[in-house]
């Protein structure tokens, strides 16, 4: 029995384990309740009583050796695992593809519009999203209690005096003209809010860009040429424009701005509803009353203004058929704009 103990001791001392299954094999053989050491303890009853004390000590030593070794083996297996995850980086591997983000399509459109107008001398101005009645309506020549105010379903924050979420970026026109005297050439992009049911085509929060040009001798021809320049730069050089008479309280005359349908080449399609034209915004000559409200003399200065929906022209340009996609944060949608930045 003594030799057996010696042999086991040597086996325990020499044991190496690099993997979990080798560790488990050690545990089963030397530590578990069915281990060889347990068997030896069971054999004690067959040993002569005078030898029992010594054998008992030897077996206890063996048991402790096995325990100590087991703890060491656990530590060494853990270390081997760590080393394998800390392995040196393989510098010859290709870089991880597809990690670049992309600009949001509305940011891309806004950026493009600003760039196009920057080239003809427009700067950028911003106004608050929470606006008073004067800047959103009254200064823009919306008469008190006039039905035109109902054209835009307003989210009011306070009544008397009226404070509301701006319904259009035209409010920034007023803020700019109050502060700055002509010549003015400015573009005002931003968020606007209207109490409208959300659908495929409409949202209660969307974006517009407002343009304003005030100087001596600004004419309707200037407006027309500027709109044509923009349309060609943004939608392609063969784009045509059409100005349809319309009504806005802050412009006189006013027009709706259409572009030739670039999707069907004016042959007629679903997007242009078979008319060959699609509307992209409103425009007109700044009403003399608006200039007066901002302390600009309409006898000396004239101007034009325009407003476009950023969602609308983004949907047209990239043929996006649901306005809600812009706010859903679906990575499969957003990813498609990676190359357009
Ligand atoms: N503010 C108008 C709207 O939200 C758009 C607009 C039309 C702006 C004509 C203008 C303009 O500056 O001249 O529907």
Image: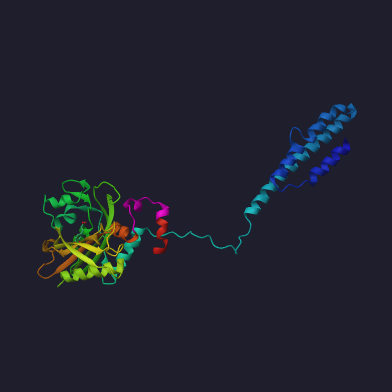
Q: Residue placed at 76% from the left, 47% from the top?
A: 16
Residue 131 appears in the picture as rendered: yes
Please report the residue visible at 16 percent of the width from the left and 69 percent of the height from the top.
220
Instruction: Depth check: give the residue in front, 297 or 120.
Output: 120
**Percent position of residue 187, x then y:** 25, 64
Location of residue 286 (image quadrant):
bottom left
Is the residue 200 above or below the residue 106 in the image?
above
Residue shown at 83% from the left, 44% from the top: 10
Please state the quadrant of the image where ligand 1 appears. bottom left
Question: Residue 172, percent across and down?
Answer: 22, 60
Q: Quadrant of the C terminus?
A: bottom left
Q: Which residue lies furthest to the left in this view?
A: 299
Q: What stretch is highlighted in magenta?
A: 319-333
Where is residue 207 drawn, in percent x and y? 28, 56
Q: Does the magenta stretch include residue 249?
A: no
Position of residue 72 in the picture relative to residue 179 (left or right)? right
Given residues 81 and 335, the one toward you in this image is 335
Q: Residue at x 35, y 62 (%)?
A: 108
Specify whether 311 is left or right of 54. left
Q: In which quarter of the image is residue 86?
A: bottom right
């Amino acid at each position: 029995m003594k030799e057996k103990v010696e042999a086991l001791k040597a086996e325990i001392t020499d044991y190496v384990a690099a993997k979990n299954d080798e560790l488990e094999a050690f545990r089963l053989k030397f530590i578990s309740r069915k281990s060889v050491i347990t068997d030896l303890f069971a054999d004690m009853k067959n040993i002569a009583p005078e030898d029992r004390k010594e054998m008992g000590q030897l077996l206890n030593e063996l048991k402790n050796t096995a325990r100590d070794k087991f703890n060491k083996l656990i530590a060494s297996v853990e270390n081997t695992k760590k080393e394998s995850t800390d392995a040196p980086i393989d510098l010859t591997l290709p870089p991880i593809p597809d990690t670049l983000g992309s600009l949001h399509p509305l940011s891309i459109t806004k950026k493009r519009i600003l760039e196009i107008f920057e080239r003809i001398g427009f700067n950028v101005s911003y106004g608050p999203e929470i606006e008073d009645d004067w800047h959103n309506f009254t200064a823009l020549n919306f008469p008190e209690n006039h039905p035109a105010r109902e054209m835009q379903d307003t989210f009011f924050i306070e009544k008397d005096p009226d404070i509301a979420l701006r319904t259009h970026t035209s409010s920034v026109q007023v803020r700019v003209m109050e502060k700055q005297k002509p010549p003015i050439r400015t573009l005002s992009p931003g968020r606007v809010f209207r109490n409208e049911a959300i659908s495929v085509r409409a949202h209660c929060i969307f974006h517009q860009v407002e343009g304003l040009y005030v100087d001596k001798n600004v004419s309707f021809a200037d407006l027309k040429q500027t709109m044509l320049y923009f349309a060609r730069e943004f939608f392609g050089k063969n784009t045509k424009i059409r100005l349809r008479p319309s009504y806005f309280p802050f412009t006189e005359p006013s027009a709706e701005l259409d572009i030739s349908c670039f999707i069907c080449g004016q042959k007629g399609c679903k997007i242009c509803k078979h008319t060959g034209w699609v509307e992209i915004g409103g425009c007109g000559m700044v009403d003399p009353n608006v200039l007066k409200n901002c302390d600009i003399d309409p006898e000396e200065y004239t101007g034009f203004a325009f407003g476009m929906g950023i969602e609308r022209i983004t949907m047209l340009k990239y043929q996006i058929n649901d306005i809600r996609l812009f706010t859903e944060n679906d990575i499969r949608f957003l990813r498609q704009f990676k190359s357009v930045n």
